[in-house]
Amino acid sequence: MDLIANRLKNIKPSPTLSVTQKARELAATGKDIISLGAGEPDFDTPKHIVDAAKQALDNGMTRYTGVNGVLKLQNAIMMKFERDNALTYSQNQIHVSCGGKPVIFNAMMATLNQGDEVIIPAPYWVSYPDIVRLFGGNPIIVSCPAEKNFKITPDVLNSAITSKTKWLILNSPSNPSGAGYTEGELKAIASVLLKHDNVWIFSDDIYEHLIYDDFNFKTIAQVEPGLYERTLTMNGVSKAYCMTGWRVGFAGGPEKIVGAMTKIQSQSITHTAAVSQAAAIAALEGPHDFIEKNNTIFEHRRDLVVSMINQTNRLNCSVPDGAFYVYPSIEKTIGLTTTSGKTIKTDEDFVRELLEKEGVAAVHGAAFGLSPHFRISYATSTDILEEACIRIQRFCHSLT
């Protein structure tokens, strides 16, 4: 009898975490490695948030809480949805977990039966398909190429929907492309979804506040109230609040699904750490001026990376609306040869050789469901990004 469950044969470790770990291992051997694989802000958690956590510990906030956290956190989340998204939820419509990934995990576990379909626009965050597969679902990958601005269109969505469709996952701004859906684009998508009442919408808004230029963020239940009862809107404090390690994600949605997710969590992680909840309260209720300051720095980094990547005619990089990633095409490098005689056949070949030759760690596009591309995270210092881009340029120019 095989010890390991068969369901694990259908999934693989997270490619982004694997790249980051590989970069750490190489750096530990003394190699000069620049890691652009992790989706983690390089800014420290703001002081007022850290201080609130310290005060909570001093006040004895070290014990179990309810599955969805303390009432003050639930109220802060409800206030956030009302303030930022004009969405009104009650306490029993709020789910809190240890980051965004467990929220997705709980939602899919609570709803998917064998053979249910989940529409996932590609490029996608790497964990979506595997979480769906883990619970017997069938991820329906819909290609959204650069010429479509990496976004699903109403006609393509309509063609992908079947009687087995249970969810559509929307991520705006997107990891890995940084593309954001405008209000008009969301309304057009919503017009299709209103005709298919079997389809639920999972709106992953984790990069909501990381937006640039004149992009105006909206979430789908906000622009189409008719989808409110079929939408689970997820967010968290990891990205905009520079709190990746605190592990707090949350969602608002219909009581029926939130109740099912809560039941699951009561038998798994129980709740996120009490001290992290205190920090999340301070993040949501406290001053937010640091977000705009950080975004100014991120925008400068974005512009630097896009400009330097596009300085080589062998790469083509779109300008993202938000998040802190760029997703250049390497199509013009396919078929070229490295100085050691290796041929670039795929984007995985490209990033592997880039790491080998120049010590730059990035994630290949196939991991996100759309090739030939690779993802760069610009959530690191300007000096490091400039050096990394010089190395990428040098690598591309060395190909023959």
Image: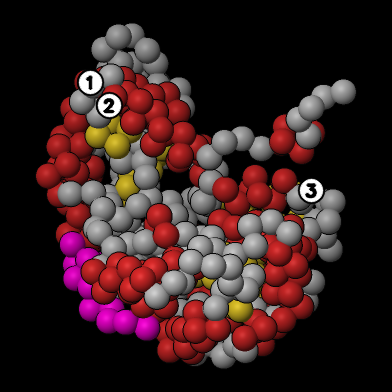
Q: Disc 2 marks which residue?
A: 27
Cα gap from disc 3 to disc 2, whole angstroms:
39 Å
> How far from the left and from the top, in percent, is residue 22?
39, 28
Q: Disc 1 marks which residue?
A: 30
Q: Disc 3 marks which residue?
A: 136
Under circle 1, the secondary element is loop
Q: Which residues are magenta?
A: 285-297
Quarter assignment of residue 217:
bottom left
Q: Residues within 10 Å of mark 1 (few under 14, many from 20)?
A: few
> How far from the left and from the top, in percent, is residue 191?
64, 79
Apparent side of residue 361 relative to residue 65 in the rendered image (left or right): left
- Residue under the point 44% across and 72% down: 60
> How far from the left and from the top, in percent, is residue 153?
56, 65
What kind of residue is marked 3?
Gly
Quarter assignment of residue 154:
bottom right
- Residue under the point 57% across and 48% down: 127
